Structure formats: structure tokens, C-alpha cells
């Protein structure tokens, strides 16, 4: 990991959510884009998984007291905050395990977008105050065409993917465009067909409690 971080630094590639030690791992990426001040930050909510320490590189642990204070400070400085999670994985629309507690904690602290990067199976979304929470986008380039549930049932919902395009303007978060894709041939995401997209979005607006299930 130290070698990887050096490559990032040599090529001026910003990174967050991990670092050479726990202090660096907690640092947000700060940038200004077209007049919008953006802070991108995140942590790993898995119980035991490659966490950074004072002397060992790794992922940022989800210390919510720390991150809540950090978000509040950045918001006071005029930043729009994007917070992403690596977290426990489940093969259902979710949220699952302790997702809700952590995702909502950073939203309540002032994060504008809260997103899960852990999900192999796409998860639901919700509005909390002025924040959008999307608990998991699903796979992108991961070669998971199917998954075998503990019951033995084989599912292929791992092929369905969200790609969220967030829109910021004049210091405000305006919303998200939900792009949708289907995984083909183990490694090739393609835009969904009109019928696939209609079914996918209908399912997830229903699972998210935002509208009745629509027939397609």
C-alpha cells in the first residue's frame, strides 16, 4: 500500500479513505470546481478489514465522533461534503447490518451526498433532511454475473448497476441523475435497455418507499 500511495503522489492523484497511517487516512480531498468547494471523504465500516493505525497503512476506521466533527467544520467553511462508505455486504436491496446508523450519522452532520461503494448488489436510497443517501450502487467492473445465496438459489441481480451523477451549482447540491447499467460478459458494463431501466428503477423506487410498484 505504501508503494501505491507513492505512485499516487508522484502523479498528483488525490486519494481519501485510506493512507499511510490513521491520521492521513482520515484526511478529506478538498477541491474547488467551477466555484463549488467540494470535500470528499470516507471510511471503512467493516468490523475488521485492513484498518490504518498510528504506524500501519490501511483504510480509515469509521470513528463517527471524529467524522461528525470534521463534517461540521468543513460545512462551516462552505464545503459541499460527499461521504462514501466501504461497509458490510449483503445480497438484498438493503440497507443491512449497521448501514443505516452510520450513513444517517454523517448525513445528520451535514454531508450532502452519502454513498456506499461496498455493494455488489444495488441498494436503496433515501432522502434525509437535505442529504441524499444511496446505500450501495452495485458492481461496476467486478466480474460477478451471478451469486449463490445460502439457500442455494442463484441470482443475477449482481449484474444491475447504478452510476450516480451528482449535480452541484452555485454552492448547492441540486440532485442526482440515476444512470443505470447492466454487466455483460463478466467485465463489460453497458447502458440498460429501456425495458431493463424501467424495471430496475420501478423496483428501486418501490424498495425505497418512494412510489408504488409499477407494472412494466
Image (cartoon, helix red, strand yellow):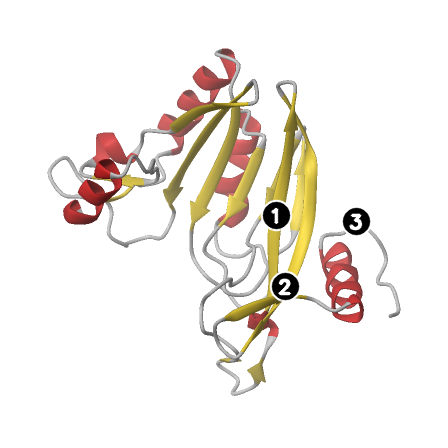
**Is residue 43 shown left or right of residue 176?**
left
Q: Is residue 158 above or below residue 172?
A: below
Mark 3: give few (<14), some (14-19) or many (20+) Cα within 10 Å.
Answer: few
Q: Is residue 91 left or right of residue 176?
A: left
| Label 1 residue SS | strand
What residue is rendered at 21% in x and 37% in y? Answer: 10
Q: How many numbered markers are drawn?
A: 3
Of callouts 1 and 2, which one flags the residue occurring earlier in the amino acid sequence?
A: 1
Distance from disc 2 to disc 3, alpha carbons, whole Å, reads 21 Å
* Residue hosting label 1: 164
State the residue in front, 100 or 60: 60
Quadrant assignment, res 30: top left
The part of the image, by quadrant, that contains residue 112 is top right
Q: Nearer the viewer, mark 2 or mark 3?
A: 2
Query: Can see residue 21?
Result: yes
**Residue bearing the label numbered 2:** 181
CA distance separating discs 3 and 1 = 18 Å
Q: Which residue is mark 3?
A: 210
- Please tell me how crowded label 2 is: few (under 14), some (14-19), or many (20+) other residues with Cα within 10 Å: many
Indicate whether 42 appears above or below 190: above
Q: What is the quadrant of the C terminus in the image?
A: bottom right
Dot 1 alpha-carbon crowd within 10 angstroms: few under 14, some 14 to 19, many 20 or more: some
Q: Is residue 54 above or below residue 38?
A: below
Residue located farthest toward the front when viewing the structure as drawn: 11
Identify the residue at the far right of this view. Answer: 215
x 14%, y 35%: residue: 54
Given residues 141 and 208, the one toward you in this image is 141
Amino acid at each position: 500500500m505504501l508503494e501505491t500511495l507513492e505512485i499516487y503522489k508522484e502523479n498528483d492523484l488525490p486519494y481519501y479513505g485510506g493512507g499511510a497511517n490513521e491520521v492521513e487516512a482520515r484526511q478529506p480531498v478538498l477541491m474547488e470546481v467551477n466555484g463549488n468547494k467540494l470535500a470528499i471523504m470516507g471510511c471503512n465500516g467493516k468490523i475488521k478489514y485492513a484498518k490504518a493505525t498510528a504506524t500501519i497503512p490501511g483504510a480509515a476506521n469509521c470513528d463517527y465522533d471524529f467524522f461528525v466533527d470534521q463534517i461540521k467544520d468543513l460545512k462551516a467553511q462552505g464545503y459541499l461534503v460527499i461521504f462514501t462508505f466501504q461497509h458490510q455486504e449483503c445480497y438484498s436491496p438493503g440497507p443491512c447490518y449497521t448501514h443505516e446508523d452510520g450513513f444517517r450519522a454523517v448525513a445528520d452532520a451535514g454531508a450532502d451526498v452519502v454513498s456506499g461503494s461496498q455493494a455488489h448488489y444495488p441498494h436503496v436510497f433515501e432522502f434525509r433532511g437535505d442529504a441524499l443517501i444511496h446505500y450501495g450502487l452495485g458492481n461496476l467492473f467486478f466480474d460477478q454475473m451471478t451469486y449463490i445465496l445460502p439457500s442455494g438459489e442463484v441470482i443475477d441481480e449482481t449484474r444491475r448497476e447504478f452510476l450516480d451523477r451528482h449535480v452541484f451549482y452555485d454552492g448547492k447540491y441540486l440532485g442526482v441523475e440515476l444512470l443505470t447499467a447492466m454487466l455483460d460478459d463478466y467485465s463489460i458494463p453497458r447502458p440498460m435497455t429501456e425495458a431493463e431501466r424501467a424495471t430496475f428503477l420501478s423496483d428501486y423506487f418501490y424498495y425505497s418507499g418512494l412510489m408504488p410498484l409499477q407494472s412494466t
